[in-house]
Amino acid sequence: MLFISNHVSIPASEIELQAIRAQGAGGQNVNKVSSAIHLRFDIHASSLPEFYKEKLLALNDYRVTKDGCIVIKSQEHRSQELNRQAALERLAMLIRQVNIVQKARRPTKPTRSSQIKRMDKKKKHGQTKALRGRVV
């Protein structure tokens, strides 16, 4: 059971975990031990509330496939159990992130005094450059 919030949790039967061999350097151990974890979670077939499903499917993330599956690969740890926990935590963080509503940005304008200060500074800089010219 993966807990997302107080009211939302995902049963372990909906999460598909598969042990695979990790990539990269590591010598003999990496070639014979399947320590990396490949996690697949089908959004459509899950028991998540509709709000979460809609937001996850609309998410522009490389981990969400076109057919509505979340794919996470974890291979940063040497043990399979730590990689399993890391993959599950990343899935939970992705789903929690969807629930956060961004505050709407209100466009602002610079104040009148800051505009006047900016123009004065530009005039002063221009006068300084004009004084550097050739003396006739």
Image: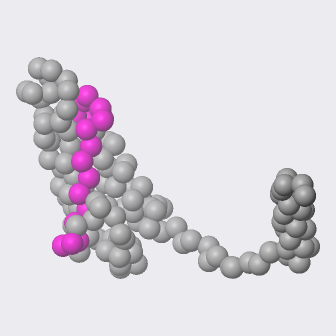
Q: Is residue 46 visible?
A: no
Residue that protrudes farthest toward the top in the picture:
28
Q: Is residue 14 visible?
A: yes
Q: Residue at x 56, y 71 (%)?
A: 102
| Residue 58 left/right relative to 7 | left
Q: Quadrant of residue 101?
A: bottom right
Q: Nearer the viewer, residue 77 or 105?
A: 105
Q: Measuring from the top left, give residue 124's x and y in whole percent.
A: 90, 62
Magenta region includes residue 99: no
Q: Measuring from the top left, give residue 30's x and y in whole percent.
A: 15, 27
Residue that protrudes farthest toward the front in the picture:
136
Q: Residue at x 74, y 78 (%)?
A: 108
Q: Measuring from the top left, give residue 27's x and y in whole percent.
A: 15, 21
Q: Residue at x 11, y 20 (%)?
A: 28
| Residue 115 left/right relative to 32 | right
90 relative to 24, above or below: below
Magenta region includes residue 79: yes
Q: Nearer the viewer, residue 11 or 34?
A: 34
Position of the C terminus, as image quadrant, is: bottom right
Colouring rule applied to residues? one colour
Q: How many marks?
A: 0
Q: Quadrant of residue 46?
A: bottom left
Residue that protrudes farthest toward the left in the picture:
32
Position of the N terminus, as image quadrant, is: bottom left
Q: Nearer the viewer, residue 121 or 133?
A: 133
Q: Which residues make up the magenta segment?
A: 66-82
Q: Measuring from the top left, give residue 92's x and y in whole percent.
A: 38, 56
85 relative to 93, above or below: above
Q: Residue at x 86, y 60 (%)?
A: 130
117 relative to 74, above or below: below
Q: Quadrant of residue 128?
A: bottom right
